[in-house]
Image (tube, rainbow, N blue to C red):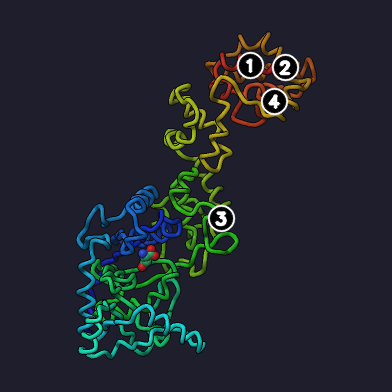
């Protein structure tokens, strides 16, 4: 089995999520870097669903993985749903493939049946702990004779299959981490097939990567310790070892593992909160990679053109939620208005959107998007556009509407202005309001901005918000008249 085939001349990478949860933002980063590497090298990007742990896997999580990757624009060339030349691409449909490779390893002396019970294994472990030795399996089933095995089988024991770790060391050049080597003496013979006939992760992943002709494996550095075992299996099978690249971990701002207590962690959670997928992709690209021109806001295509795996940082990256918010805000500001309006609608579902035409809704989004960082902020920021009545903030009532300026400005507006104001034409209304400000400044010494505060307070119940002229035109005459009269 020493003859190494050189079959990996085409760049083929994969993302291999386990569907035991919604797609994690860290897995999205791994998917992205694989996607970028494939694009950069005219390669193929494969999706494989690793659902050998049937109890923890679910179709809902598989669907979430599909939806999240698609939403991010990380569409795969081969996968369970689109097929491809090396399928099936879902491990639970490949269960009949693994035993024959395990048998091949047994026949060639690289693996053996292990009949140890869990109790026996636990006892071995306790013994190591007692003697303060690092624990590894003793290898006691390595030398069982056929007769001994038959006897154990007759007792009803079902064997697992263990890989016989050779002496020496295992080393390789990691595309990100550089040269790495492992002392095989520290690695115990590990299980490749469980006694229930299902493969372990380390075995299934090698068989699948080999059969799917994966040339480069880019994944999180939490898998480095598995890599030595995987290389041993490739070598035992006489298969070409793919190139590995291990990305630093993504840590929370407090440098602990990113988890729910820090905020959203699943891509779908970020999307629900109102992050744009374009911003998310851009942001996760910067977790370990930096653009050559220093400009951080980049489309997926621009990132792909600039991406080099050997320039990816080997250290951990910090997931700065503040930076993501800033970046999302940048995307919200420049996004196509019609598209943004569609994305915003779910956040306005508590309002009666039929009060406005599509064009007017776009205008509402246009005049409120400037300060926001996530779309969900628009639920509150657009509130005063809906309904006849408006909620007046207590502070606004006290400081503005009960004040002297409002008492002069608002009755005057009702008496002399509202009938003249042009609610059809923003430009005209703009001029009319300018005249009103001048009048109060000249006649009553009221600062122009105070005049506007009084009107804004009456109409929106707030001190800040969208452009006043646009707000008045959108609300329309009836509603403005009603609100100002009510305020007085
Ligand atoms: N299913 C593994 C995971 O989700 C894949 C690891 C690998 O890329 O080899 O961590």
Assign the N terminus to one quadrant of the image: bottom left
Q: Nearer the viewer, mark 1 or mark 4?
A: 4
Precedes in sequence: disc 3 or disc 4:
3
Residue located 66% across and 14% down the image: 485
Q: Residues within 10 Å of mark 1 (few under 14, many from 20)?
A: some
- Write down the residue under mark 3: 262
User: Which numbered dot is residue 453?
Assistant: 4
- Write down the residue under mark 1: 432
Q: Secondary structure at mark 1?
A: helix
- Answer yes or no: is residue 442 visible: yes
Q: Secondary structure at mark 2?
A: helix
Q: Quadrant of residue 139?
A: bottom left
Residue located 56% across and 19% down the image: 388
Q: Secondary structure at mark 3?
A: helix
Name the spot of residue 183 as percent of width and height, x first: 42, 86
Q: Looking at this view, is 209 or 12 the one in front?
A: 209
Left or right, residue 60 beside residue 404:
left
Precedes in sequence: disc 1 or disc 2:
2
Q: Residues within 10 Å of mark 4 (few under 14, many from 20)?
A: many
Distance, label 4 to label 2, CA atoms, is 10 Å
């Amino acid at each position: 089995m020493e003859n190494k085939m050189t079959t990996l001349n085409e760049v083929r990478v994969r993302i291999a999520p386990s569907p035991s949860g919604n797609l994690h933002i860290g897995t999205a980063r791994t998917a992205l870097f694989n996607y970028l590497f494939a694009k950069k090298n005219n390669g193929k990007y494969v999706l494989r669903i690793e659902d050998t742990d049937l109890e923890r896997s679910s179709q809902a999580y598989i669907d979430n993985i599909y939806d999240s990757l698609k939403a991010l624009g990380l569409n795969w060339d081969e996968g369970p749903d689109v097929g491809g030349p090396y399928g099936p691409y879902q491990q639970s449909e490949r269960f009949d493939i693994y035993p024959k490779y395990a048998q091949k390893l047994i026949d060639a002396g690289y693996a053996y049946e292990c009949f140890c019970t869990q109790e026996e294994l636990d006892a071995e472990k306790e013994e190591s702990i007692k003697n303060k030795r690092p624990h590894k399996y003793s290898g006691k089933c390595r030398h069982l004779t056929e007769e001994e095995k038959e006897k154990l089988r007759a007792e009803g024991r079902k064997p697992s299959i263990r890989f016989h770790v050779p002496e020496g060391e295992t080393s390789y050049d990691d595309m990100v981490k550089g040269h790495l080597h492992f002392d095989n003496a520290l690695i115990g013979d590990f299980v490749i097939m469980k006694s229930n006939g299902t493969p372990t992760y380390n075995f299934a992943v090698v068989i699948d990567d080999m059969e799917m002709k994966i040339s480069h494996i880019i994944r999180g550095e939490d898998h480095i310790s598995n890599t030595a075992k995987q290389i041993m299996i490739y070598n035992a099978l006489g298969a070409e070892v793919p190139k590995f690249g291990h990305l630093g971990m993504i840590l929370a701002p407090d440098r602990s593992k990113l988890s729910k207590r820090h905020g959203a962690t699943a891509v779908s959670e970020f999307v629900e909160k109102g992050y744009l997928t374009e911003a998310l992709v851009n942001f996760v690209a910067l977790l370990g990679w930096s653009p050559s021109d220093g400009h951080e806001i980049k489309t997926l295509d621009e990132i792909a053109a600039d991406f080099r795996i050997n320039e990816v940082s080997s250290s951990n990256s910090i997931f700065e939620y503040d930076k993501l918010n800033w970046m999302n805000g940048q995307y919200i500001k420049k996004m196509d208005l019609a598209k943004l309006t569609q994305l915003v609608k779910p956040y306005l579902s508590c309002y009666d959107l039929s009060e406005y035409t599509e064009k007017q809704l776009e205008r509402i989004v246009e005049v409120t998007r400037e300060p926001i960082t996530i779309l969900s902020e628009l639920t509150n920021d657009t509130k005063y556009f809906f309904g006849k009545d408006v909620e007046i903030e207590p502070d606004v009532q006290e400081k503005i509407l009960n004040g002297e300026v409002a008492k002069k400005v608002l009755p005057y507006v009702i008496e002399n202005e509202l009938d003249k104001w042009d609610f059809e034409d923003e430009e005209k209304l703009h001029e009319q309001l300018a005249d009103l400000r001048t009048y109060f400044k000249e006649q009553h010494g009221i600062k122009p901005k105070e005049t506007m505060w009084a009107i804004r307070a009456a109409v929106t119940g707030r001190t800040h918000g969208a452009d006043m002229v646009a707000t008045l035109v959108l609300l329309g005459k009836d509603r403005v008249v009603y609100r100002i009269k009510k305020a007085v």
